[in-house]
Image: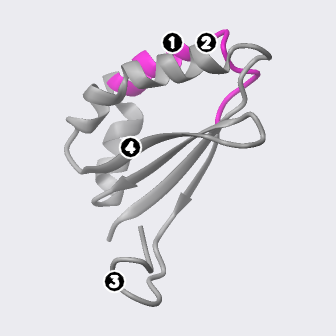
Amino acid sequence: MTVVVTAVFHPVEGQRPALIEALSAAMHAVHAEDGCLLYAIHAASDGTVVMIEKWAEPAALAAHAQGDAVKALQAAVAGLVTGPAEVVTMTPVPAGTQSQGAL
């Protein structure tokens, strides 16, 4: 069963470009992790930065959470965010068409 995650980062005022750059630097390492199906940065209209993730299974997400890429990412964003990211973990509830009804 796949797992979808949103992680909302609240940048320190004026630091959103630096935050996006720091998150971008981690992309190749995360994309190479087993079970990573999607790991994408989005700039939200409210000034936050949102990472949208999709993992092949809960075990892959758990490994990611404990992995070196996340440790490097946390170090890279220190000082650029007002606090920890707001993380929500979800399981898809498909509806409608297969390509449009679930991440």
Which residue is found at the position 27% from the left and 27% from the top?
29
Q: Residues within 10 Å of mark 4 (few under 14, many from 20)?
A: some
Contact, mark 1 vs mark 2 (Cβ under 8 Å): yes
What's the amino acid at mark 3?
Gln
Contact, mark 1 vs mark 4 (Cβ under 8 Å): no
Task: Give the alpha-carbon distance from disc 3 to disc 1, as whole Å.
Answer: 38 Å
**In magenta segment, residue 51:** no
Contact, mark 2 vs mark 4 (Cβ under 8 Å): no
Q: Which quarter of the figure has residue 11?
A: top right
* Residue where numbered disc 4 is placed: 39
Task: Give the alpha-carbon distance from disc 2 to disc 4, as whole Å.
Answer: 20 Å
Which residue is found at the position 35% from the left and 38% from the top?
64
Q: Nearer the viewer, mark 3 or mark 1?
A: 3
Magenta stretch, residue numbers: 69-85
Q: Which mark is residue 78?
A: 2
What's the amino acid at mark 4?
Tyr
What's the amino acid at mark 2?
Ala
The vertical placement of 64 against 96, above or below, is above
Identify the mark nearer the N-term, 4 or 3.
Answer: 4
Q: Which mark is residue 75?
A: 1
Identify the mark nearer the N-term, 2 or 4.
Answer: 4
Q: Residues within 10 Å of mark 3 (few under 14, many from 20)?
A: few
